Image (cartoon, rainbow, N blue to C red):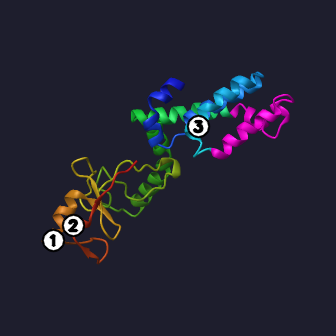
Amino acid sequence: MYRWCQEHRPQLEGKGSSLEFKLHRLKYINLLVEGNVTAALCYANNFVPFSKQNSKEIQQLMACLAYCKSGLENSPYSSLLDPVHWIEICEIFTRDACGLLGLSLDSPLEVCISAGCLALPSLLQIKQVMQQRQCCGVWTSRDELPIEIDLGSDHRYHSLFACPILRQQCTETNPPQRLQCGHVISKDALTKLTNGNKIKCPYCPKEMSPNDARELHFY
C-alpha cells in the first residue's frame, strides 16, 4: 500500500487524500509500541512532506516519545492505539482507489435496488390516487417520475447534469454552462437562446453576453 501511495502521490494530493500520512502514522506508532524508539525517530522523517497540513497531529506523535517507557496505553495519546485506525485506513484506501479508477464506491446494483425500495411506496401511493380520481394522461413519459421523490443524502450524486431547458444529459461535447446570474444550462441551450450577442436567462430577467458563461465540471 505504501508503494501504491508513492506511485499515485500527485493524484492523491490533488484529491486532498490523507491516506499516505495515516499509513506513516500507523507505522510510527507500531515502532513505538515495539519499544524501538531510535527507529521511530528515524521514521518520523516521513512526516516532513505532510507537516503543513498535519502540524498539530505530528506534534502529538512526537510527544508520544515521552511516554515510551511507561507505555502509550497509559498516556494521554492512548487513543492512537485504537484498532479503529486500521479500519479507517481500509475505508480511505477503498475510497481513493475507486476514485482514481473512476469506479463507484458502492455497487451500482445495490444503489439501484436501494433507490427503488425507497421510491416504490410513493409511486404506489400516487398510482392509487390517480386510479381513484381516474386521471389519464398525467404520467406519459417513461423516463420521468410524476412526482419528486427524496431518496435522502446517501443517494445524491452530482457527477452528471441534465439540462433543464433541453432535458438532455450533458456530455463532453455539450458541457454545462454557468450563466452570470448563477443559473446553469447546457452549451446547446446557450447557443439556441443566444440572440445576437445577448442571452436572456430562462429563469430570471437578467440579460448578459454568452461569453460571460463559464463551463462547469462536477466531481
Q: Residue at x 58, y 37 (%)?
A: 48
Residue type at tag 1: Asn
Percent position of residue 70, x then y = 87, 30
- 143 relative position to 73: left or right: left
Marks 2 and 1, Cα distance to the nearest angstrom? Answer: 7 Å
Percent position of residue 118, x then y = 50, 48
Q: Which residue is mark 3?
A: 48
Residues tagged 3 and 2 counted as in contact (Cβ below 8 A): no
Residue range of the region highlighted in magenta in the rendering? 55-84
Vertical placement of 211 versus 49: above or below?
A: below
Percent position of residue 185, x then y = 28, 61
- 165 relative position to 66: left or right: left
Residue type at tag 2: Pro
Pointer 2 local density, CA inside 10 Å: few below 14, some 14–19, many at least 20: many
Residues tagged 2 and 1 counted as in contact (Cβ below 8 A): yes
Residue type at tag 3: Val
Percent position of residue 84, x then y = 69, 34
Q: Which residue is mark 1?
A: 197
Mark 3 or mark 2: which is in front?
3
